[in-house]
Image: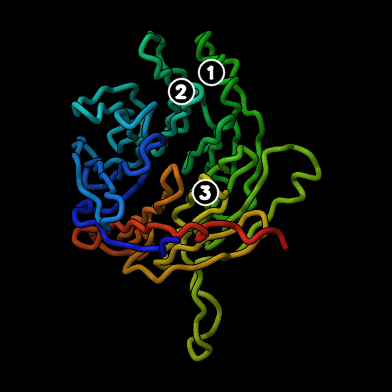
């Protein structure tokens, strides 16, 4: 069994990393979006402890999120310029799919339904068909709050908003409404109040379509299940993490950091969290246990993501906005790390 290895990518973005994602059909292809107005495409070289920069895609404004589309040659971006874009990663051609009234915070793609969903600070979702043969315009869904995190499972999409609002939508229902061009037929499959009292920073869905995890600015993570039964809802729980104990001579207590990033392992169903404390931890959601915490990184962890085969964990590191730095800049301090996991590193320990 090969031991775990970790390396720093030689050509990281020039400013803070906003998101990173591996291609669903190419576990060595990685996209990274940045506040430096670019999206970066990397190719991880197996067995060589390196990742090569393949191409850079320039935007007019900071890019807040990125996701792959139907294959490794297609991507979608969310920008501070209010635009939702499709990028042909081979030719570099960029196409505007829709324009929101405020910055676009998140984009997620559903391969099963061929649907792209964007969430904007104008408190709307835009639903786009990515089928090339479709001439449909996007549909708009009004939200009751400002969205801060978005994630899709095979059949659901979870929207986490201000005021502890969480809406869960059914993707097949959205696909049907899109086909009939009727946004009026789209209502949340479930409406929930977040288990976390403070602002949601990240959400990630379980690969087995059973539930999701959310994290907050106040050093906590919550794990919940979709099934709306008393038994299933009784399983949900939240826990403290990404905190540092203060010595007694400094008053004791904890320094609390935001949990900026979450990602589920596609094979084992465990998940990684990344925080403002500069650490990444692996958790067993079923057994409610922390499996391991990695060596501290030089700055806040902004983004984490697993490759589709579960072999690689990408970690985006840059100064955290929570530090109160005046004239913020991640230039020179933004780093990208790739960890090649050992065979059992992300495997759960089993229930208690």
Circle 3 Cα neighbour tier, 10 Å, few/some/many (<14 / 14–19 / ≥20): many
Residue 323 found in image quarter = bottom left
Q: Judge by depth and name the residue closer to the eye, 259 or 31.
A: 31
User: Which quadrant of the rendered structure holds the C terminus?
Assistant: bottom right
SS at circle 3: strand
Q: Judge by depth and name the residue closer to the eye, 140 or 304.
A: 304
Judge whether 27 appears above or below 125 on screen.
below
On the picture, is 164 further left or further right than 3?
right
Q: Judge by depth and name the residue closer to the eye, 312 or 248.
A: 312
Q: Mark number for residue 175? A: 1
On the picture, is 299 further left or further right than 259?
left
Residue at the limit of the structure toward the front, as seen here: 1
Circle 2 Cα neighbour tier, 10 Å, few/some/many (<14 / 14–19 / ≥20): many
Q: Residue at x 48, y 43 (%)?
A: 149
Q: Mark number for residue 264? A: 3
Residue at the limit of the structure toward the right, as seen here: 230
Q: Name the residue under label 2.
A: 115
Q: Judge by depth and name the residue closer to the eye, 89 or 4.
A: 4
Query: Closer to the N terminus: mark 2 or mark 3?
Result: 2
On the picture, is 97 further left or further right than 341?
left
User: Which quadrant of the rendered structure holds the N terminus?
Assistant: bottom left
Whether residues under marks 2 and 1 lie with C-beta atoms below 8 angstroms apart, the answer is yes
Q: Distance between the residues labelled 1 and 3?
A: 25 Å
Judge whether 257 appears above or below 195 on screen.
below
Residue 331 locus on image (x, y percent): 20, 58
Query: Closer to the N terminus: mark 1 or mark 3?
Result: 1
Q: Which residue is drawn at 54% across and 83% down?
A: 252
């Amino acid at each position: 069994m090969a031991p775990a290895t970790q390396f720093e990518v030689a050509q990281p973005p020039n400013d803070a990393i906003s998101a990173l994602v591996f291609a669903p059909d190419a576990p060595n292809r990685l996209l990274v979006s940045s506040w430096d107005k670019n999206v970066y495409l990397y190719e991880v070289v197996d067995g060589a402890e390196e990742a090569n920069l393949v191409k850079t895609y320039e935007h007019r404004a900071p890019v807040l999120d990125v996701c792959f589309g139907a294959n490794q040659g297609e991507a979608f971006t969310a920008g501070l310029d209010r635009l939702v874009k499709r990028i042909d990663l081979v030719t570099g051609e960029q196409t505007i799919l829709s324009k929101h009234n405020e910055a676009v915070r998140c984009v997620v793609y559903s391969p099963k339904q061929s649907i792209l969903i964007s969430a904007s600070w104008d408190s709307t979702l835009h639903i786009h068909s990515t089928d090339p043969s479709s001439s449909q315009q996007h549909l708009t869904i009004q939200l009751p709050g400002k969205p801060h995190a978005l994630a899709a499972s095979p059949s659901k999409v979870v929207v986490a908003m201000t005021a502890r609002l969480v809406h869960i939508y059914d993707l097949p229902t959205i696909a049907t409404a899109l086909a009939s061009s009727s946004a009026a037929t789209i209502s949340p499959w479930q409406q929930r109040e977040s288990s976390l009292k403070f602002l949601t920073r990240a959400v990630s869905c379980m690969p087995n379509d059973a539930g999701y995890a959310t994290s907050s600015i106040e050093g906590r993570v919550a794990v919940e299940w979709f099934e709306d039964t008393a038994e299933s809802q009784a399983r949900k729980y939240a826990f403290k993490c990404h905190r540092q104990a203060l010595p007694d001579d400094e008053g004791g207590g904890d320094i609390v950091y935001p949990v900026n990033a979450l990602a589920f392992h596609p094979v084992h169903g465990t998940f990684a969290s990344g925080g403002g404390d500069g650490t990444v931890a692996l958790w067993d959601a079923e057994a409610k246990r922390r499996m391991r915490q990695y060596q501290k990184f030089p700055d806040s962890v902004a983004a984490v993501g697993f490759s589709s085969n579960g072999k690689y964990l990408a970690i985006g590191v840059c100064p955290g906005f929570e530090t109160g730095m005046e004239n913020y800049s991640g230039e020179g301090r933004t780093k990208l790390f790739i960890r090649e996991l050992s065979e059992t590193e992300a495997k759960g320990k089993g229930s208690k």
